[in-house]
Image: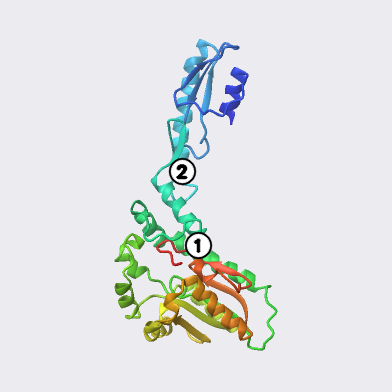
């Protein structure tokens, strides 16, 4: 960083210490003073050292600092945030720490990366952030991008044999159907899951389709690939699930697998693995899986490719 280079040049030592804002230091080998400033500019995000080589230049340097600060505010207004969060850094006692919005976005991203696992509820301080994301154009864009990556993969991945054994797996909730209307009334993951109320809502068959995956579903089906729906929903929800899927435009899948009584004793990832093994044993080639949970992909046998669509509201293991 420029400021550290000046600091090192001044003292003739290598340092990784970022001085506090407003810090003054008198150079022992050169006759000038360095003053450290911070800005929130997306361009000037590092500390700035201003050299006061002569009293004549002191007023000029201070004017320059004022100009830089005003410029940083101007750029912050006109350039737009570099991410969804309007990220700003705060420095306290030499430690760089993120503000709440940055923390919550980091939490959300690490959920998607499967670094954060097994959480029962969204942290209370991040519920509002998750709500905003899951109902935002950014969520829609992220889902659309995932679907576009599937299309790119399909454009050159698969040598279909036309023997009826080429297959694709879709999850249902947050993949084909959205449960966001339910979670709008139940804290967007900030409340511990109440299976009774969720299943009662599912029985109403009113979950809307996710438009991007609806289009993808039919594109894959029209290629002659058999579609298998594998969900962690209970077998008792079969009828309302089928009604819901058909009502919003899904039709023509090969089979729908839901969790029976025996499957409810299995971890979800072992249940999905078991279903894939049955398909492979029947001679199917699984070209891909689209799902919102990592448990839809984990375990043997693997599909040729997996595509994770975003969901920060809950975790199913």
| Residue annotated with mark 2 | 78
Which quarter of the image is occupied by the N terminus? top right
**Camera-nearest residue between 169 and 101:** 169
Percent x, y for residue 162?
Answer: 67, 87
Percent x, y for residue 115?
Answer: 50, 56
| Residue annotated with mark 1 | 142
Percent x, y for residue 152?
Answer: 63, 69
Question: Please, which colouring scheme is shown?
Answer: rainbow
Say which residue appears at 52% left-offset and 33% top-offset. Answer: 46
**In the figure, is residue 239 to the left or right of 58?**
left
Q: Is residue 197 above or below residue 2?
A: below
Say which residue appears at 30% left-offset and 65% top-offset. Answer: 186
**In the figure, is residue 28 to the left or right of 134?**
right
SS type, badge 1: helix
SS type, badge 2: helix
| Cβ atoms under marks 1 and 2 closer than 8 Å | no
**Camera-nearest residue between 121 and 185:** 121
How crowded is the residue under tag 1: few (<14 C-alpha within 10 Å), some, or many (20+)?
A: few
Q: Earlier in the sequence, mark 1 or mark 2?
A: 2
């Amino acid at each position: 960083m420029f400021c550290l280079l000046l600091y090192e040049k001044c003292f003739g030592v290598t340092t990784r210490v970022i001085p506090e804002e407003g810090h003054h230091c008198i150079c022992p080998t050169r006759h000038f003073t360095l003053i450290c400033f911070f800005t929130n500019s997306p361009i000037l995000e590092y500390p700035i050292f201003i050299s006061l080589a002569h009293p004549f230049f002191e007023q000029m340097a201070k004017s320059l600092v004022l100009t830089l600060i005003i410029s940083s505010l101007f750029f912050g207004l006109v350039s737009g945030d570099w991410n969804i969060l309007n990220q700003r850094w705060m420095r306290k006692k030499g430690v760089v720490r993120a503000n709440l919005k940055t923390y919550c976005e980091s939490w959300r991203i690490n959920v998607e990366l499967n670094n954060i696992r097994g959480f029962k509820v969204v942290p209370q301080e991040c519920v509002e952030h998750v709500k905003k994301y899951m109902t935002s154009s950014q969520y829609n864009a992220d889902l659309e991008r995932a679907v576009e990556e599937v299309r790119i993969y399909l454009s050159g991945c698969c040598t279909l044999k036309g023997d009826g054994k080429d297959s694709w797996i879709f999850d249902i909730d947050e993949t084909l159907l959205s449960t966001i209307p339910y979670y709008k009334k139940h804290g967007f993951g900030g409340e511990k899951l109440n299976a009774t109320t969720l299943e009662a809502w599912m029985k109403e068959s009113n979950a809307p389709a996710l438009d991007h995956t609806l289009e993808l579903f039919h594109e894959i089906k029209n290629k002659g690939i058999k579609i298998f729906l594998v969900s962690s929903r209970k077998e008792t929800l079969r009828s309302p699930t089928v009604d819901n899927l058909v009502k919003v435009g899904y039709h023509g899948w090969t089979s729908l697998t839901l969790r029976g009584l025996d499957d409810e004793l299995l971890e979800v990832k072992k249940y999905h693995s078991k279903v894939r093994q049955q398909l492979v044993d029947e001679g199917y080639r699984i070209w891909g899986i689209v799902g919102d949970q990592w448990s839809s992909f984990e375990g043997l046998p693997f599909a040729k490719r997996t595509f994770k669509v975003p969901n920060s509201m809950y975790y199913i293991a």
